[in-house]
Amino acid sequence: AVESNKDFAIIFSTAMAPKLLEKAMNLLSLRSRGEYCTDRVVHNCLNFVNMSIELGNIYKLLRPHMDFLLFQIAFPCLCLSEDDVKTFKTDPHEFIHRANDPLQDYQHPKQPAIVLISNLVQYRQKDAADKFLGFVTQILTNYASSSPEMRDYRQKDGALVAIGSLQNILKSKKRYSVSLEGLLVQHVIPEFSSEIGFIRSRACWMMQHFADIKFSNQAVFIQCLISVTNLLKDKELPVQVEAANALRFLIEAADVVQGALLPYLPATLEQYFKIMQEIGNELVVKGLQTIIEKYGPHIGQRAADIAFRLCQCFMEYAKDNIEDDDAAMAAAQCMEALTSLLMGCSNTPALYPALEVHLIPVVSKIISCDDYIDYYENSIDIMSYLTFYSLEISPALWSVFPLLFNSLNSWAIEYILNLRALAENYISRDPIGFCQGSSPEGVPFPMVIINMSRNVLSDHRYTETDCKAALQLITSILLNCHGAVDHLMPLILDTAAMRSSLANDSPAVKMCVSEIIGAALHYNCPLTLEILQMGNATELMLDMVLGSLQDDYGLNGSPRKAVAFGFCSILKQDFCTLPPLVKLRICKIF
């Protein structure tokens, strides 16, 4: 306890906690006697008992009841209820939703029971570890030795949940880790073909937790891989979802998987999309994303079809995101998967035009209104890949440019930093297209950026980082559009002068203003000096740049180079033609 609460903590742990523990244990015993007790009450009581483990004097009271606590209270919470089994069969979508709903951790007693067992096994090892592991091992042994009609499937499910939840402890201790492969062979792999749907589902769930163990026999690992892949076509939807998620862990666990799964790749991809059409589930899409990342070079000719179907799934999920959180998360994962697809195809840019056909309409829809703002950052990532790796900036890609800045100026002001790198791709990859292009309203693209930058620099809602991004975009125009923006130089230099006049600007922003001046001198030194002289800004701007250098305002890398190039451009000019203020500062500059 913190110093101010120590007295209270002492009184609570000695006088109140023992009485509360007695009441909590009495409430927990209700279910073991067949009496009613709500999930929420059991949840809170288990949380209190879990905290009692840490207090030595309270744990002494708890220790004599260890068997009751582990076997009659905690373990039954891990087993599926009759209602769960019924829901599995009659409403698989609801079963999947419950299994992946984080709110269940705060309502159902299963999660605090798992935490309680884990803490007892880890921190009270002498009293709990061997006792509990022996208990679940006996359940598995009895199950394996019983005839099918005598087996308690729900108890085995609970035993597997217990073992999976203890994965970190079991993997970290050699006395347990050496037995894990044998446990999978004996008690998990046979259940891939179980007649009971939720047992097949649990077998897939176990592979999510133990796919990364060291297998002495690679044939066992391959058998797990093939079995899980086959269960993608299981007749029960919850089994398909668990298999789709489990395959991700198997693929990530070992390189040997890549060759083994290749013959099944087309059918596996097809099955993933069938599952995604049936239900919007983030973990399923994440599994597909892993396949795309690992098998990028082998996807090649299927890339356009995968992009098309991911876009279809995204639009289907996104329209339901207000009412369905699962669909919203699945939609976001679709966008992540599309990014992974683009990454996998980056070494084959000739594939990008076929991908653009499907991606541009989706991105345009996302950035056209704030209804899809949750996916705005994903859309920028997609456009960044398209504009960086494509062989050329196509007219379709340019059609998105004005939409990006329209959204930024109206409802996406916080995304300017994300937008900077994307805009620089446009400018640097196709400076001619940038200078010649214009928005539907007829505003030239360079003016679109300059107007946006001026708005950012004069709006208090934007942070220092946002202002830096706006200034860096102007620098990018000067460095990439040589000779094409002479008519905009007065406005550009006025923007720099406007910002440099702020006395309380941070060194980082001053650095970016100095970079603009250096880039402007490099772009056209006589024109820049003439404009500064006409605006009586020569002294202000040069002194600010020199001050940045002398005061070490962080000018390094690209900004320092831009300033150096700008000053070198001054050296190229006839000394006699230089403005007097520049002549006076020549020795300071060099």
Image (tube, rainbow, N blue to C red):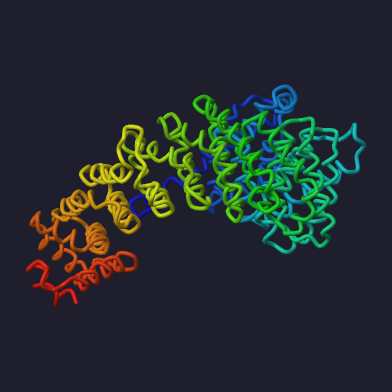
State whether residue 24 is above or below residue 179. Answer: above
Kindly identify the residue that appears in the image at 70 percent across and 38 percent down: 272
Kindly identify the residue that appears in the image at 91 percent across and 39 percent down: 146
Q: Nearest the camera: 466 or 40?
A: 466
82 displayed left or right of 586: right
User: Which x, y percent locates residue 455?
Assistant: 24, 42
Q: Nearest the camera: 279 or 389?
A: 389
Q: Nearest the camera: 183 or 74?
A: 183
State whether residue 130 is above or below residue 436. Answer: below
Q: How many marks?
A: 0
List the single residue furthest toward the right.
147
User: Which x, y percent locates residue 307?
Assistant: 61, 39
Residue 26 in view (yes/no):
no
- If the image is split into quadrants, where does the C terminus sit? bottom left
Image quadrant in which you'd find residue 252: bottom right
Kindly identify the residue that appears in the image at 15 percent across and 61 percent down: 529
State whether residue 31 is above or below residue 579. Answer: above
User: Which x, y percent locates residue 59?
Assistant: 57, 50
Q: Nearest the camera: 440 or 133?
A: 440
Image quadrant in which you'd find residue 501: bottom left
User: Which x, y percent locates residue 212?
Assistant: 70, 56
Residue 425 in view (yes/no):
yes
340 displayed left or right of 132: left
State whether residue 323 is above or below residue 172. Answer: above
